[in-house]
Structures are given as structure tokens and as C-alpha cells.
Amino acid sequence: MTVAISVSKLVKNFGTTRALDQLDLEVATGEVHGFLGPNGAGKSTTIRVLLGLLRKDSGEVSVLGKDPWHDAVALHRRLAYVPGDVNLWPNLSGGEAIDLFGALRGGLDPVRRDELLERFALDPTKKCRTYSKGNRQKVAIVAAFASDVELFILDEPTSGLDPLMEAVFQECVRELKRDGRTVLLSSHILAEVEALCDRVTMIRDGKRVDTGTLAELRHLTRTSVSVETAEPLSGLDELPGVHDLSLVNSHYARFQVDTDALDHTLRHLTRFGIRSLTSTPPTLEELFLRHYDHGNDRVTTGVAQRAGA
Amino acid sequence: MTAFTGTGRLVQLALRRDRIQLPIWLVVIVGVLAALTSSVTGIYDTHQEQLSYATTNVASAVARAFNGAIAGPSLGSIVAAETFVFLSVIVALMSGMTVVRHTRQNEETGRSELIGAGVVGRHAPLTAALIVTVGTNLVLAGGATGVLVASGLPGSGSVAMGLALAGVGISFAAIGAIAAQIPESARGANGLTAAVLGGAFLLRAIGDVTGAPRPDGLAMDSGWVSWLSPIGWAQQIHPYDSPRWWPFGILVGFFLVAVGFAFLLTAHRDVGMGMVPARRGPRTAPRWLLSPIGLAWRLHRGVLLGWTIAIAVLGLAFGTVSDEIDDFAETSDAIAEYFTQMGGTDALLDAYLAYCMGLFGLAVAGYAVQALLRTRTEEASGRLEPVLAAAVSRPRWMLSHLVCVLAGVVVLLLTAGVTVGLTYGLIAADLWGQLLRLTGAALAQLPAVIVLAGLSAALFGLLPRWVTAVSWASFMICLLLEQIGELLELPQAVLNLSPFAHIPNVPVEEVTASPLLVLSTIAIGLTVVGVLLHRRRDLTPA
């Protein structure tokens, strides 16, 4: 696999606050990579370092084989960026802003531009000051997607879009993937990440806490099981890998089980004559909560404010 | 819940947001009043000087157009003539912009939706904005009165003058309140207020020019047109000579009626919407816009156009007055002394022209600082980020803005030279000679102007969060050193801190190349430092 983005041991400080602390991130060429983390985890800071807008304090960063700080201009011809908070010039029209971003990046495809305007139902003749947040995001999205580039860096691109537009956005990302482009997608919308991403990286407090395909991440977590049996249940609480057991009555139990303990747990259950059984694989949301649930007090510190959403 | 619920909290919020801005306005306005008053009381210190000032004012239409009609030959009336119209324009801007900032700007940014969703009545935001603005004007009235009394002017007249300034302020607070209801943007509302202010200034100028002299020839009654302007009403108070208190009734009455109208408009429109819908723009961008320099030009051109018109009007006025300078000085030795001191020659007319060019140099430096700080605005608002995330290097982006600033400065200095040269050349029957001579004299200011711009550029690279405050402070220091430094008899070493101190007094003196070259080199050096430091630092949003 060739690597589009490679970050290792990246450190970035703002004054005395450490925004990124030995962060690692690897994005393969041609994949859609989800970048997850709570507010203030350092997602936007990482992306700004990847774009050469912030200077790293230490660590290695390579984007499309180049150093984003020193080779910014050459590199930026090959990538497109959608910021999380799109700020536009109030007296330019949306159409002017799209053309401007395209031209500054090295040109955009006018046919594709018009097609995207149509699909995202954006009126390009309105002045940017009159656009809502969602419409400002559409301006940045259309300008990015109409560019013929290898890498797309999208920082919470859909946080202001309605569900209809969200669907259009997902369709566009799938088209990019089909064309072999690479996408780094930072997002809060887990359904979107589940629908689009090949692999994900989760970060917290400026560190990577987990990375892999969704299947791999699930493997490390627990499946929810509820079971009803003919015989009274026993011995479940002594089985290794079973957690949060609640016996509703002697024939009915609900519990969570580690994925690698699933097999012997089911063998154990069959002895009691299974009447019904439902098992639910963990959703990304559960994965997310499991990683971040215990540290809410830690993420609302200065780092959160300096690094932005 | 009434329509005014929550006003108190919103007043607190507005005071908290403006805790730096409003004190700066107040200190600058009161400080300028103190400086001007001390210089005027120094110059017109004898009864003879005061009589001749009054005679000149009655005789000169141009003097009245800028200073208003004199109310009598007292020192207080001279101070009022020299300061009131100028300061009332600044007070009007402060008041109108404060109201717009706490009403339409909140709506435009969407903050008012958040506020309106709380326990806040429909009329509370406007009421809070007006309370803050009226309060600020009352503080201003107190400060101005204090400064005037401290200069030895009579007490009741000084109170009247302070309140008259506040009267203009509250009138324009009410005009700002109406303007905030009409367009959808704060910029548009401010522009509308400024346009009304321009009209008010012009109407009172016409009134003062077309007034009738009193029989003794030492005072003038403004014409009826002055009564169409809030500034005109406040002028008619005549604080120091036969004061009248009833024009305050007109000012307060106007405030109440206009505010009532603004409340009526608020009650009939939706939050965020204007009375006039925003205009549409083009579907695609014109070719010239599609580069960093095209974008920079687009961002600078509107402000530059406004400045060019203002400089041209001033240049035409200054050139036209040159005809009257000799007559003017005959009536007053103090005026003659003032110009020869500022212009550095006994040839009065040339001294006057050199003084004008120095003034234009300073004004254009103000533009240069304002235009250069656009770089910081772009960065702080987050609009720079997507530009630099495209294939645009930081030096290229910054140079695009620097080129626009430099071009704007040259255009403004040329405008000043050409307008003064044209009018003075026609009067002196030496059109081409004077046009060339004065255009050259205006352009000789360029090196000092770009030193200030270069300083802002270097600060932008070094201290992005402080560049705005420090740049304006440096400009204010130069302005004060140039305008009152010599009157205050400051040591030459202090005066030399201003780059303008090193510009020869053209057209009086010959242009010498070496100071201009040294200043230009400093300016270029500072700019290069700014570009390099910006290249090396983190992008720093607000």
C-alpha cells in the first residue's frame, strides 16, 4: 500500500498547552479515512499542520511524499481542503468565491462546478454574507470537489448540511473513491463515517487511541447479547469475557461479551436450550463512547479552545 | 415578559464588549479637544487677535464652511469654531457605529438569534444599544466640559458646549438606530449613517456660508439651511456668546421621534431581515479576480475609492482657500505665525501649501495603516486559511496586499497634488507649473507614508495579535508629533521619531534625495522583515 499521509510522533504546543502529543496517523492512497475525536482532541490542529498552516514542534509529517511546511505551494496544487468553519468574503458572490478557490488551487472543471451547484442546490448569485452556515460549507465543498486533485482533506464538512445534502455529499465522496482519490474525513457524524470510511483513526487529547478498519476496531470490543433459554441459566457470571451481566429472571439474561470470547460463551449457552437469541455488534457510536466516556472532564480544557472544533 | 425584558443584561453585555473600544473613543475625542483648545488659547491670547479672528470668519466663506459661523469675538467662541464641527463629526460616527454594532451587527452574525431565544423582549437589544450610546455621550459631555473649564473658559458655556457635542451624538445614535433597520449588513447600516452625516455636514456648511453678519461685523447668524441638520442645531446653541438653551429641545425631540420610528420599524420586520434585500452578485468570477492580487484589489478598492473622493474634495478646498491666505493672514499675525512655523518659511502662501502637503501626508499614512491592517483582518477572520491552503505561498499573498497598499497610497498622494495644483494653478494663472510643482510636493511625502506601512507589516509578522493596536498607536504618535509637537516645544530628538519630520518642507524647500532614500530603505527593510516573519510563524486566528 502506498501512503498518502504519514504522521509520526507529531507534537504541537500552543504556549504551555500541548495540543498534539506524539500523534500518529497513516492514510493509504485511495482510501477514505475517518478521523474521529471529541471537540478539542486536536483534529483541526492536525489538519492545519498537514496543510502547512501551523508549524510542528517535533515529529515527522509527510503529505503525498512532501513536507507540508516547506513544499506547501507545490503540495497544495495536488490537494483540496474544506475547513470546518467556512469564512468567506461578505461582498463576493458564492460563484465568485468558488471560482476564486478553484483558480488559486490551479483551476477547476467548469462543467463539474455547475453540476455540483445543481446537486447541492446552491444559488451562486447570492452574496456570501447572506449565506447560512450550511450554504457557506456548500461553497467550500463545491470548490473542492470540482478540483482535479489527488487528496481531499475535509474537516467536519457536513456539520451544517441537512440530511438530503448529507446524502449528496456521501454520494460525491463515493465517486471520489471510485476514481482512486484519497480522502481524509474528520467528522462527528458517525453514521457518515460508518457509511464511507475504509479505515478510521480515533484521537483524544492529541494522541491516537485507536486505528484500523471498522471490523478490526469491532474485534477489540464487545457484542451485546440477550438470550432466553428453556432451562434455568447458570455459570454465566464465571465465564471469562462476559461483562455487565443482568439476569432478568432465571431464563432470560442480557450481557456484553468480548468478541474473542463469543465462541465459548455460545457453547456454554446451548447447554440450556436456546429459545431466542439476539446479538448486536457494537456500533461506531459505542466504540466512540467507550473510548471517550471516561474523560469528559479532560477535554474541556485550554486545548479545546485553542485547537478549535 | 414585556418588549423590554432583558434590557439590563444586554446593557451589561454591550459594556463588557466595548470595555476597550468606547474608552478609547472618549480619550481620543477629549484628548483632541484638549490639544486643540490649548493651541487655540495660546494663539488668540489678546483681545486684538480675537477680534481679528471674528472678522476673518465673517469675511471668509471657506472658513465658515469648515469651522461654522462665529458666534462672537470671545475666546470661547473661537475654540468652538475651531473644534466643534470637526469633533461633532467624530462623535456622530462613534454614536452611530455603537448603535449599529449592538443591533444590526448582532443580527448579521447570528448572535441576536441566540439572544432573542433567551428571555429577551423584542425591543430590548435596540433599547440597550441606545442606553449605552446615550450614556457614553453624557460621559463625553462631562469630559469635554472638564477640559474646557480647565483651559480657563467660562463654566456655563463649557457645560453647554459639552452637552451640544452629546446632542449631536444622541441624534446620530437615533439615526444609526433607523439605519440599522434598513439594510441586512452592519456595513450597509454604517454606510447609511455616514451618508446622513455627510449630508448633515454639507447642509450646515451651506447654512453657515449663506448666513447673515451681525451689524458689528463680529458675529454671524447661520442661514435657514443650517436648521435642516443636527450639527446645525447644536451649533446654534452658541455656548460662549449669548448662549441659547432651546436648541437642546430640538435635539432631544428629534432623538425621541427618530427612536420611536426605529422601534416602529423593529416591530414590523423579522430578525435578521432588512427593509431592503441584499443585492445579488455574478454567477461566475471575472478573470481579473482569479489571483491573489486580484482578490487583494477587490478587497481594497472600495475603501480606496472613498478615500480618493475625500482627498479630492479636501484638495480642491485647500487649493481654493489659497486665494484667501494672504488676506486671512493680514487680519491676524497669529495665523501668519502659525503657518510660517508649520511650513518653515516667511513666504506665507508657500508655507500654507507646504502645511497642506504635510497634512495630506499624514492623512494618507492613515489610509496606509488601515489598508495594511486588512492583512490581519483576513487572518483573524479565518478567511486567510483556505487561501493559503490553496497553491498560494505566504509571501505571494502578503505581497499582493502590499502592492495594493502602495498603489493606493500613490493614487491618494497624486490626487492630493493634482487637486491642490489644479485649483491653485488656476488661481495663480500658472496651471502647468503649479500642477507639476505641487504633485511633486505631494509625492515627496511617499517615503514617510510607507515607513508607517512598513512598520505595520513588520508588526504583522512579529505580533499578529497586537498589530492593530500598536499600528494605530504609532500613527497617533506621529500625528500628535506633527500637529502639536512644535507648539508644545518638544525637543527635536522626540520630534525626529516621526518619519514626517525628515521630509523636506516641499514646495518651500528643495527636494533632497538622501532623507527620502533613507526613509524608503527603512520602509523596504521593515516590509521584508514582516514578510519573512509571517512566512515563519503559525497562522493565528483571532
Image (cartoon, rainbow, N blue to C red):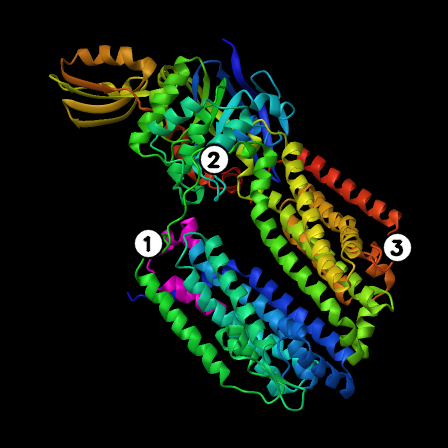
- Which residue position is annotated with label 1? B117
**CA separation, marks 1 and 2?**
34 Å
Which of the marked residues, 3 or 1, is nearer the chain's N terminus? 1
In percent of the image, x 80 and y 55: which residue is there? B433
How many other residues sit within 10 Å of disc 3, few (<14), some (14-19) or many (≥20)?
few
Q: Position of residue A230 (x, y in %)?
A: 11, 16
Residue B118 magenta-highlighted: yes
User: Which residue sits at x=20%, y=14%?
Assistant: A269
List x then y, in percent, for residue B184.
Answer: 41, 52
Chain identity of mark 1: B
Indicate whether A64 appears above or below A56.
above
Disc 2 target residue: A96
Main SS, magenta residues: helix
Task: Say if the magenta span includes residue B107.
Answer: yes
Query: As shown in the figure, which amino acid type bears the numbered disc 3?
Result: Glu
Q: Are marks 3 and 2 on the same chain?
A: no
Q: Which residues are magenta?
A: B106-134
Q: Amino acid at mark 2?
A: Glu
Mark 3 sits on what residue?
B510
Q: Which residue is at 56% across, 41% downward? A: B298
Amino acid type shown at disc 1:
Ala
Residue furthest out toward the front = B429
Residues A24 and A220: in front is: A24
State whether residue B122 appears in this view.
no
Same subunit, tags 3 and 1 = yes
In the displayed structure, does residue B344 sit left or right of residue B379? right
Estimate the spatial distance between the alpha carbons at disc 3 and disc 2, rounded to whole Å: 49 Å
Mark on residue B394?
A: none
- Please give the chain letter of the residue carrying mark 3: B
